């Protein structure tokens, strides 16, 4: 008889492969990939990171928020119940985690301190590795 460990917490959520990954790897511009595959957190995260690097904070915030919400939708479709691990080590999870990181950074830059803190905490709670990598 197998006993369940009641203290183990929720299982990891592992998203399916994002078709945007192949498009981006082939050199298709992220703006084209986001237009073609608007449900892709990876495409929106790529746009968000580029905008933030260019000092376009509002654009980065908007791209990241879009990708974050698309990622939440995908997580829920894949069994996520609002909390629990979303491991960075599983590559298809990285689009969502990248969006969450940029959303937090952009929120901090525009003075949305509470949102920046929520994003930072959510990122660390989802994946400590992602929080370290994306810091």
Image (spheres, rainbow, N blue to C red):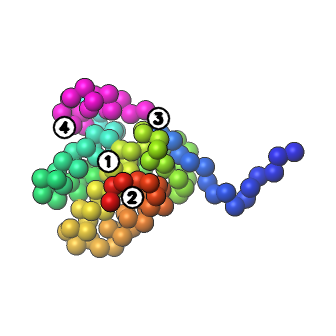
- Magenta stretch holds residue 60: no
How many angstroms separate mark 1 from mark 4 (CA)?
A: 13 Å
The image quarter containing residue 8 is bottom right
- Numbered disc 4: secondary structure: helix
Q: Is there a contact, CB below 8 Å, between mark 1 and mark 4? A: no
User: How would you rate the neighbour count of disc 1 (Cα within 10 Å): few for under 14, some for 14-19, many for 20 or more?
Assistant: many
Residue 24 drawn at (x, y percent): 26, 32
Q: Residue at x 29, y 58 (%)?
A: 103
Left or right placement of residue 133 versus residue 81 in this view: left
Mark 1 highlights which residue? Answer: 67
* Mark closer to the observer (1, 2): 2
- Magenta stretch holds residue 29: yes
- Numbered disc 1: secondary structure: helix
Residue 134 drawn at (x, y percent): 33, 55
How many angstroms separate mark 4 from mark 2 (CA)?
A: 27 Å
Left or right placement of residue 8 versus residue 21 in this view: right
Q: Is there a contact, CB below 8 Å, between mark 3 and mark 2? A: no
* Mark closer to the observer (3, 2): 2
Mark 4 highlights which residue? Answer: 31
Residue 130 drawn at (x, y percent): 41, 53
First to last magenta residue range: 17-35
Q: Earlier in the sequence, mark 1 or mark 4?
A: 4
Mark 3 highlights which residue? Answer: 16
Mark 2 highlights which residue? Answer: 132
Q: Which mark is residue 40?
A: none
Location of the N terminus (image quadrant): top right
Location of the C terminus (image quadrant): bottom left
């Amino acid at each position: 008889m197998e006993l369940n460990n009641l203290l183990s917490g929720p299982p990891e959520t592992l998203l399916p492969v994002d078709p945007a990954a192949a498009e981006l790897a082939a050199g298709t511009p992220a703006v084209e990939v986001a237009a073609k595959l608007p449900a892709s957190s990876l495409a929106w995260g790529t746009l968000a990171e580029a905008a933030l690097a260019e000092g376009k904070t509002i654009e980065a915030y908007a791209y990241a928020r879009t990708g974050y919400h698309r990622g939440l939708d995908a997580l829920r479709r894949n069994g996520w119940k609002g909390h629990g691990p979303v491991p960075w080590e599983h590559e298809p999870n990285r689009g969502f985690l990248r969006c969450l990181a940029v959303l937090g950074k952009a929120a901090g830059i525009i003075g949305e301190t509470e949102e920046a803190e929520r994003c930072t905490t959510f990122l660390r709670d989802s994946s400590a590795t992602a929080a370290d990598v994306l810091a």
